Image (tube, helix red, strand yellow):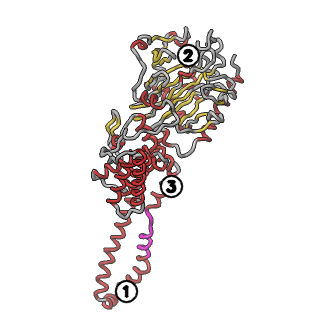
Amino acid sequence: MVTELDKMRNRVFCISWVLLCCCWSTRGEIFTSIGQMTDLIHTEKELVHSLREYIKAEESKLAAVKSWASKLDALTRLSTSDPEGYLAHPVNAYKLMKRLNTEWSELESLVLQNPSDGFIGNISVHRQYFPDAEDETGAAKALMRLQDTYQLDSEAFSKGKLPGVHSNAVLTVDDCFDMGKTAYNDADYYHAVLWFQQALKQLDDGEEAVVTKAEILDYLSYSVYQMGDIPRAIELTRRLVAVDPSHERAGGNLRYFERLLSKQLNELNQAYQPASEEPIQLGTYTRPKDHLPERESYEALCRGEGLQMTEARRSRLFCRYQDGRGNPRLLLKPMKEEDEWDSPHIVRYLEMLSDEEIEKIKELAKPRLARATVRDPKTGVLTTANYRVSKSAWLEGEEDPVIERVNQRIEDITGLTVQTAELLQVANYGVGGQYEPHFDFSRRPFDISLKKEEPDAFKRLGTGNRLATLLNYMSDVEAGGATVFPDFGAAIWPRKGTSVFWYNLFRSGEGDYRTRHAACPVLVGSKWVSNKWIHERGQEFRRPCGLTEVD
């Protein structure tokens, strides 16, 4: 039986989690939330208005100075034509004294006025909210993440050609070069090559730029060398020497590359083959492997490829009205339920949230959005991670009747108590926002599949493991943003107002490792979700144990 002490312990745990989220959240993470980036749009508009006011003030000042100059120019022409005759008139003598003592001082004050003070002050007020270098780097890496996941070449990005989207958003030569520099500084030569090549292509096509061809060739040739393509590195370095014969590194690099290639050819007993004349593009080089074993299958599912939805499986999926086993709150208006997958069973509830409820939840969450955290499997401590890029907030039922109503609805349709569940978590995914494949449940203290100790993430909560997940989609997404399950090849696409539900644990309490899932990067749009993690305690009679470990 769930006691008030259990509820209080759960609330304290979740609030502690919120505080930890805030502590671990750093200023350089604005880009993870579209919801907060919209504030920057309004800030920029205000600064543009301030800039125009400054221009008007400068123009007004200049007009006044010009008026002074014209008046004084006429006076000095008259006075210098016959200085003694001019000063012979007492009024002219007085006015000369007055001008030099008073009016020239007024002119000096006018010239010393600085109309930029208001503009500079406005910038200073807003600067604390500006993105910093870390934000810019994060946004660049987000574009590269999208490039990889959705197999988009650099030219598609530079011309704003994204799937199903026509936009005037373009990247200049200098933008592409800066993208390459971001990857280069991170020793990510795979992406550096792609973006330096795009910068070079646009420059060769006649686009004007601040960066020079020699600078691009310098970085590109070395990045290509790091990718192991020495013949092409030689060809690019020769171009660099032709463009800038006095370049400080080009000659030495060229000799080094030529010696290295000669040595390799001698060792392999091969003849020299000139570099390919084909331009470098997506697929020219193989992307290096990373920490994620299911990277290829995960990204394929995000693109809608590799889905394991067969006709036989589809024939086992149904839709129905769900009344929560006779729940009085659902008798007159049962919930529409659709099967999304047969095994493990995943269902989608239609019309789970109204537009008004969604807006209220977003309104409550926006002021609290902080960089989403994950629990470090080695230490058990909450920390930010590159594989989870979003911002999140936690909402209590007591805060607003809408939250209380949504929590009750979740309990009614799932038949599980939410008294021991975690608070409602709201997340907003921004540019390239994602959550790579992960488990929602905490694995055993010693997980054989991991071959290492893993701290019990929910021991302090005292309500057992995460039994089930209910995920609310609070926005449609123009492109990307699917929830995918790499183990069995399922992809579930966001539909505003709907929710998906699945069990993370078998009835025995053992984790269902098939439920490892991911939130695909958002390609275009803003993705808002909220989720409820339902725990084991209090479900003993609502979902009793089965006869086998995998029931």
Cβ–Cβ below 8 Å for labels 3 and 2?
no
State whether residue 198 is above or below residue 387: below
Q: Distance between the residues labelled 2 and 1?
A: 98 Å
Q: In which quarter of the image is residue 406?
A: top right
Q: Report the residue marked by disc 1.
A: 93
Residue 204 screen position, x and y as percent: 29, 52
Disc 2 residue type (three-letter)? Thr
Residue 542 falls within the magenta-colored stretch: no
Q: How crowded is mark 2: few (under 14 residues within 10 Å), some or many (20 or more)?
A: some
Q: Which of marks 3 and 2 is nearer the N terminus?
A: 3
Q: How crowded is mark 3: few (under 14 residues within 10 Å), some or many (20 or more)?
A: few
Q: Quadrant of the C terminus?
A: top right
544 or 184, nearer to the observer: 184
Q: Distance between the residues labelled 3 and 2?
A: 51 Å
State whether residue 15 is above or below residue 174: above
Q: Which mark is nearer the camera, 3 or 2?
A: 2
Instruction: Determine whether the residue tagged by mark 2 lies in a helix, strand or loop.
Output: helix
Q: Residues within 10 Å of mark 1 (few under 14, many from 20)?
A: few
Q: Report the residue marked by disc 2.
A: 414
Residue stretch in magenta = 105-115
Residue 246 visible, this angle? yes
Instruction: Determine whether the residue tagged by mark 3 lies in a helix, strand or loop.
Output: helix
Disc 3 residue type (three-letter)? Ser
Q: Which of marks 1 and 3 is nearer the N terminus?
A: 1
